[in-house]
């Protein structure tokens, strides 16, 4: 399983551990990923995603999964999230 957020594309970064003696060794900074089920109002069901804590706050701020995916760039989304976005667009077009 890739350590990458499905909504924002946030992944591992690299840097240094720096000791008190200023010795530097390489390390990885991993994103804070959580398995969550977000509710889609348009689809009327939950969607399981593995997203970062920052992305979860962004989803809440934008007003839910549907609103977040409407503004999200397709390049940042995972295949699973992109599929959900297309389903939501299709359902909204059918209701309009």
Image (cartoon, grey):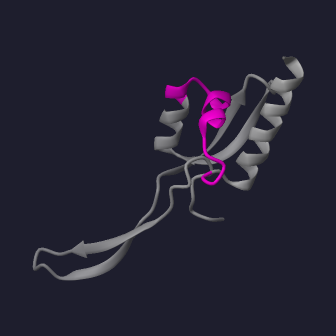
Residue 50, compared with residue 89, is above or below; it is below
Tell how many labels. Answer: 0
Q: Single out the residue that lies furthest toward the left.
A: 21
- Say which quarter of the image contains residue 19: bottom left
Residue visible at 68% across and 54% down?
78
Residue visible at 65% across and 31% down?
65
Q: Quadrant of the N terminus?
A: bottom right
How far from the left and from the top, in percent, is residue 21?
10, 80
Write down the region rendered in magenta: 60-76
Q: Quadrant of the C terminus?
A: top right
Residue 17, compared with residue 10, is above or below; it is below
Frontmost residue, 24 versus 7: 7
Frontmost residue, 90 versus 34: 90
How far from the left and from the top, in percent, is residue 12?
47, 65
Left/right of residue 62 with respect to residue 50 in the rendered view: left
Left/right of residue 94 with respect to residue 32 in the rendered view: right
Frontmost residue, 86 versus 30: 86
- Say which quarter of the image contains residue 36: top right
Left/right of residue 89 with respect to residue 21 in the rendered view: right
- Judge whether residue 71 is colored magenta: yes
Left/right of residue 29 with respect to residue 3 in the rendered view: left
How far from the left and from the top, in percent, is residue 70?
66, 33
Residue visible at 60% across and 52% down?
76
- Judge whether residue 3 is colored magenta: no
How far from the left and from the top, in percent, is residue 84?
77, 41
Q: Single out the residue that lies furthest toward the right.
A: 94
Frontmost residue, 37 versus 40: 40
Residue 46, compared with residue 33, is above or below; it is above
- Say which quarter of the image contains residue 24: bottom left
């Amino acid at each position: 399983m890739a350590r990458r957020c499905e909504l924002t594309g946030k992944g591992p970064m690299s840097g240094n551990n720096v000791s008190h003696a200023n010795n530097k060794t390489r390390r990885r900074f991993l994103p804070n990923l959580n398995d969550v089920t977000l509710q889609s109002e348009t689809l009327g069901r939950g969607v399981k995603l593995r997203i970062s804590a920052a992305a979860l706050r962004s989803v809440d701020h934008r007003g839910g999964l549907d609103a977040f995916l409407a503004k999200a760039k397709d390049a940042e989304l995972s295949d699973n999230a992109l599929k959900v976005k297309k389903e939501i667009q299709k359902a909204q077009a059918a209701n309009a």
